[in-house]
Amino acid sequence: MSSVGDLVLDATGREQIRRVAAWLELDSDPLALYASPRRRAVESAALIARIAARAEKEVRIDDRLVELGFGAFEGMTPAEIDAAGWSEIHRAWRQSRPPLYPAGAERFEQAAERAVSFFDDVLARAEGLTIVVGHGHQLRILLAVAILGIDAEAHRRLRLDHGCAAVVEWEGPTPRLAGLNIARFGSPRRSDRHA
């Protein structure tokens, strides 16, 4: 777990985003580019636009993409959580069914409401390539609920590493998860892609 505060993108993050942008190998500008309002997401989206799209592209900021609220765990490393005596609740938050939540944490279902609202307003009607830049928990919740049709708790069984892409393709009206944790393993298929 990492801090979900409004951090800037560091050198490692910029290199990861460059790798994702190069992997995209876009033939043309994406139809739309969305980002969480957090600085590192906005900077990542702008970097993708410059490298992959080879042109300045408007980054549309959407508050529904902000990271899941971690409550008392906000900004803490796992070691700091353990030192505070919260290792059991941390484990139960990450693994138990139903989960236990740290004080002040956003419920997975609340984050899912934001994710589904974004999906319904933006992705379900998108035509062509749409790029979404966000954060680990919230993007995994979006994939679990809106793409896979499973409950928000199940997002904890998906792994989406920093600086990697998930690819969703449409077969008619049905979205399909076509790839997860992709950054440098070949080129995407040339079809209607959503990353």
Image (spheres, rainbow, N blue to C red):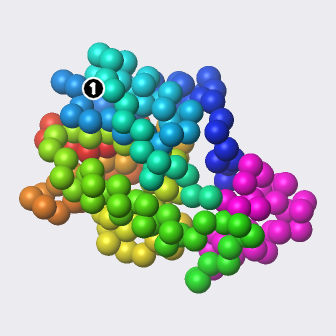
Q: Is residue 129 left or right of residue 34?
A: left
140 sits left or right of 89 in the view: left
Residue 119 vertical placement versus 92 (above, below): above
Q: Secondary structure at mark 1?
A: loop
Which residue, as the protein is rendered here, is positioned at the far bottom?
A: 98
Q: Identify the residue at image location x=84%, y=54%.
A: 80
> Where residue 40 sits: x, y (%)?
56, 33
Magenta stretch: helix, strand or loop mostly: helix
Residue 59 is situated, as x and y percent measured from the top left of the image, at 37, 31
Q: Reply yes or no: does residue 71 show up in magenta.
A: yes
The reply, left or right, for residue 57 in relation to residue 154 is left
Q: Is residue 124 visible?
A: yes
Q: Residue furthest left?
A: 172
Task: Depth check: give the residue in front, 195 or 34.
Answer: 34
Viewer-side residue, 128 vs 168: 128
Q: Relative to residue 121, is residue 195 depicted above or below? A: above
Residue 75 at x, y = what percent? 74, 49
Q: Quadrant of the C terminus?
A: top left
Where residue 146 appears, as percent x and y from the top left, is 32, 64
Q: What's under tag 1, amino acid-wise? A: Glu
The picture quadrant where one finds residue 13 is top right
Position of 124 relative to 32 (above/below) = below
Q: Residue at x 18, y 52 (%)?
A: 125
Vertically, is 164 above or below 149? above
- Local crowd at mark 1 within 10 Å, few (<14), some, or many (≥20)? some
- Side of 159 where 53 appears, left or right: left
Can see residue 52? no
Say if the magenta span includes residue 54. no
Q: Residue at x 58, y 83 (%)?
A: 97
The span picked out in magenta is 70-96
Q: Which residue is mark 1?
A: 25
